[in-house]
Image (spheres, rainbow, N blue to C red):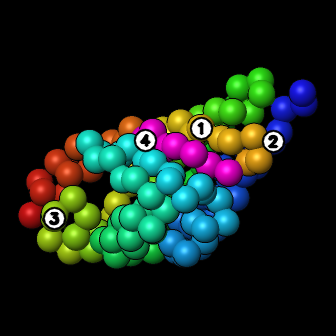
Amino acid sequence: MSARDSVSIVNAFWDAVWNGHDPGAVDDFVVEDFVIVSGGETITGREAFKQWIGKFLAVVDDLHLEVLESFQNADGSRVTSRWLLTGSNNGILGTPPDKQDVEMTGTAVWAVRDDGKLLVNWVERSSWELHRRLIAAN
């Protein structure tokens, strides 16, 4: 069995959904019962995921996600990405929408189905550090 290029699939997801500011693009990438675990929260289902993305995009103006590094396991069933998210504060993490610069790093581990659809995403991000910096300025 040859390995699929799952890194390209995940990178296309980042570009279409996050950098494209298009929650609807999720439909092209994830399964109906997709699960994401991020920030102590588990979101289940494609529609719930799209709503969550929309809320996130609303609190970070000019959001840009730069993939710093991605790699996959031998068969392409797992992808790990290290990323940098930037933008300006429009109320992220419950802070006042003061337009301060937002910079948050994170890692994402993806489970990828044989057909290339994304199944699960586990995310760790530097939101605590970002929150501390934003509230210290207010």
Between disc 4 and disc 1, whose residue precedes?
1
Between disc 2 and disc 1, whose residue precedes?
2
45 horizontally vs 89: left or right: right
Density class for disc 1 (Cα within 10 Å; few <14, some 14-19, many ≥20) is many
The amino acid type, in three-letter code, at marker 3 is Thr
User: From this viewpoint, which residue is outermost toward the right?
Assistant: 2
**In 3D space, how far apart are the residues under numbered discs 2 and 1 (Cα atoms)?**
13 Å
Q: Which mark is residue 5?
A: 2
Q: Which quadrant of the figure has residue 97?
A: bottom left
Q: Which residue is mark 4?
A: 123
Between disc 4 and disc 2, whose residue precedes?
2
Q: How many marks?
A: 4
Q: Which residue is mark 3?
A: 95
Residue 119 colored in magenta in the image:
yes
Between disc 2 and disc 3, whose residue precedes?
2
**In 3D space, how far apart are the residues under numbered discs 4 and 1 (Cα atoms)?**
12 Å
Pointer 2 and pointer 1: residues touching (CB < 8 Å)?
A: no
Name the quarter where the C terminus is drawn.
Answer: bottom left
The amino acid type, in three-letter code, at marker 4 is Val
Residue 35 colored in magenta in the image:
no
The amino acid type, in three-letter code, at marker 2 is Asp
Pointer 4 and pointer 2: residues touching (CB < 8 Å)?
A: no
Density class for disc 4 (Cα within 10 Å; few <14, some 14-19, many ≥20) is some
Q: Measured along the vertical axis of the image, is residue 2 above or below residue 117?
A: above
Residue 101 position, x and y percent, is 33, 64
Q: Residue at x 65, y 41 (%)?
A: 112
Q: Which residue is mark 1?
A: 111
- Between marks 4 and 1 in the image, the one whose residue lies nearer the viewer: 1
Density class for disc 3 (Cα within 10 Å; few <14, some 14-19, many ≥20) is some
Between disc 4 and disc 3, whose residue precedes?
3
